[in-house]
Image (cartoon, rainbow, N blue to C red):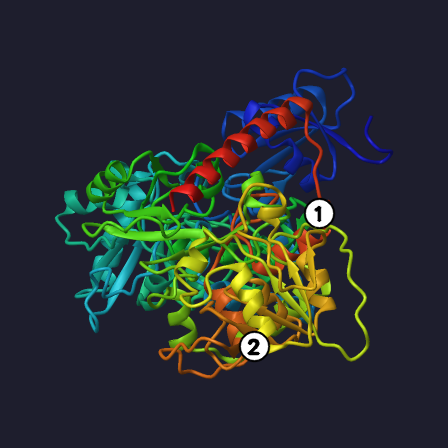
Amino acid sequence: MAEEGRKTYAVVSHGLWRQRADIARVLDAEIVAWPFFRPGRVDGFVGWGRRPSGLRALRLAATRGREAVTLEDGFLRGFAPGRSDPPHSFVVDRLGIYFDAARPSGLERLLDDPVRDEAALARARRLIDLLRGERLSKYNNSPLLSCEQAGLPEGRPFVLLVDQVAGDASIAGAGAGPERFREMLVHAAETYPGRMLAVRTHPAAGERSLLRRAAAELGLDIVVPPRMNPWPLLEAAESVYTVSSQLGFEALMAGRTVHCFGTTYYSGRGLTLDHAASPPGRRPASLEQVFHAAFLDYSHYLDLHTRERCNLERAIEQAVTVRDQRCRLDRPVFSAGLSSWKRRAMTPFLTGLGGPPVHHRSLRAAVRAARAGDGIVAVWGSDRPLPESVAAMRIEDGFIRSRGLGVTLTVPSSIAVDGPHIYYDARGESRLEAIIAHGDFDEVLKARARRLAHLLVRRGVSKYNLGTAADLPAVADGRLRILVPGQVEKDASIRFGSPAVRSNAALVRAVRALYPDAFIAYKEHPDVVSGMRSGGSVPDAADVVARSGDILHWIAWADRIETMTSLAGFEALLRGKPVGTHGAPFYAGWGLTDDRLAIPRRRRRIDLDTLVAASLILYPFYVHPLSRLPCRPEDLVEEIAASPAARRQSLVGAAWRGVVQEVTRVEVRLRDWRR
């Protein structure tokens, strides 16, 4: 039963039924499936645009005397077309739909009485500038190229003409047809003689490009830039021509002169040069008023991860995060040798401009595919050499990984992506080391890093977040308390990052030699406690060998941390504890630690904000545990802190997980034995 006062709507297609949770939130209503409901129960019918479901909803509403609700993608849709990602936004219309100018629409009604509040218009202006500054459009999976890179010579003025897909409902809805694209091209050539004619084709147009066909028929020379972010074209064009594309409005946001050869929601309002008749009575409106009506009043935004309603500012932040992370992978990715579990875990991270990764069992197959597809090979860890004949990268767990251990098959939420030397391989400069050594860190970035560090400390988040209680020893007042975090001795971080001290027992002996009167607590690594990995012989120079408790409990207890290369040293720095390093972890050698091993190539002196910015913001890739979409580290920290330590699962799921964990245990021990 619907809540009292809450409406019930019937969706009229299977595709809309799959989106029923989103639709319920957007409409704040209960959603049922047509025709599977009691007669008289529903308040209306929901369809999509002017597709069959939209037309069906209109017919059912009319025959049954109910409300018709039309949904469409919002003007900030997402990274790429299709169903691979959930949409950022929907538009909701109870009169018509914005691109059908022949009938009233909800957006038209909003613009009949546009917002006049100065604060609201100032917000609209800020959001226009933000969208433009961040280079966001409806879809955001195109590379950011300069006009010169797109084949438009510097210094030569051009007119931009925006193509659309033949047969699209937005063309007919604008009162236009294919002939209007031909007329538009002729007008541009005659009005701007000597100007280059650049045609921005629609990604889905292909051979149905109306402007390319018209140019061929007219014998006009045009330049067709490659797939690219539209903003550089919009900002550089002398003028922009469109029939009814949303890019026409974005051109207005970019301050361009816009010629409209169809009737759009933004034409006929004093903002455009109109070559098509506007509906009678259409009122003038400012750019900010049209934006407010379309993007703030008419559109509805959902958080990408929680799917709760959110504002446009939050949607922009998330769109930028998804776009920026995926654009870091500008070529198709071909993985080599990942297990089936790890393939599923890595796919969200390795999805980029070339789409999702293609997984191969062997390195040879991945290299062959990458060579054929101009891609990049991805391998896990540092145990195998990277191929030399193609581009390649290494991937590894990140620094804010998950709530649980990797060896127990807890899905990661962050990874590191690097070249020949990943962050723990001190034999050469990793990408993280290069960022720290040579990167630019402005005050805005450092302030964000400072807030992130404070958030980590306040929310008690570390790499694994096991959350187990610790049996902390009592120590006499005045006696120095030192924590020595244990490591898995077969790990590459010791083999490649700690050439002098190479075992936990040797580390504790070295610490005892430095601090003979201290109370030393040796904390076994969680993988060792779980029985999955070996930590070597138990150190006999420690006062206590601890197996219980989350590492953060022990860091809080300690006065100082001594380590080979453990990430616990970095987490201790975040919490203001002095750290001694006996190897060369990524955070050593920059003036923040007491280095027992010299690292001559690390000469730059940095502050903690710079280290946090490099290692937690600029370097890793993140995906959100709920959505498996790219997210900010701040969002991941909040989700880990808020989520339960263990989620319920079915008996079958638990049994299967146990089997896979036991297989993983054997595989890990075999791998460690071979080293």
Q: Residue 26's quadrant in the figure?
A: top right
Specify the farthest residue to the right.
4
User: Which is more N-terminal, label 1 or label 2?
Assistant: 2
Residue 414: image x %, image y %? 52, 52
Please, what is the three-letter code of the amino acid marked with disc 1? Ser
Residue 593: image x %, image y %? 54, 77
Quadrant of the frame with the N terminus: top right
Q: Is residue 238 left or right of residue 310?
A: left
Task: Pick whichever, 629 or 498, lies toward us.
Answer: 498
Crowding near the residue tagged with mark 1, few <14, some 14–19, many ≥20 C-alpha atoms within 10 Å: few
Crowding near the residue tagged with mark 2, few <14, some 14–19, many ≥20 C-alpha atoms within 10 Å: many
Residue 530: image x %, image y %? 62, 43
Vertical placement of residue 523 versus 48, above or below: below
Residue at image x 66%, y 34%?
21
Distance of label 2 from label 1 (alpha carbons): 28 Å
* Residue identified by numbered label 2: 608
Residue at image x 68%, y 48%?
309
Residue 536 appears in the picture as rendered: yes
Of helix, strand and loop, which one carries label 1? loop
Please, what is the three-letter code of the amino acid marked with disc 2? Leu
* Residue identified by numbered label 1: 643
Q: Residue 426's quadrant in the figure?
A: bottom left
Q: Is residue 323 left or right of residue 1?
A: left
Residue 140 appears in the picture as rendered: no
Task: Pick whichever, 376 or 67, lies toward us.
Answer: 376
Q: Residue 146's quadrant in the figure?
A: bottom left
Q: Is residue 594 left or right of residue 7?
A: left
Of helix, strand and loop, which one carries label 2? helix
Residue at image x 49%, y 54%?
489
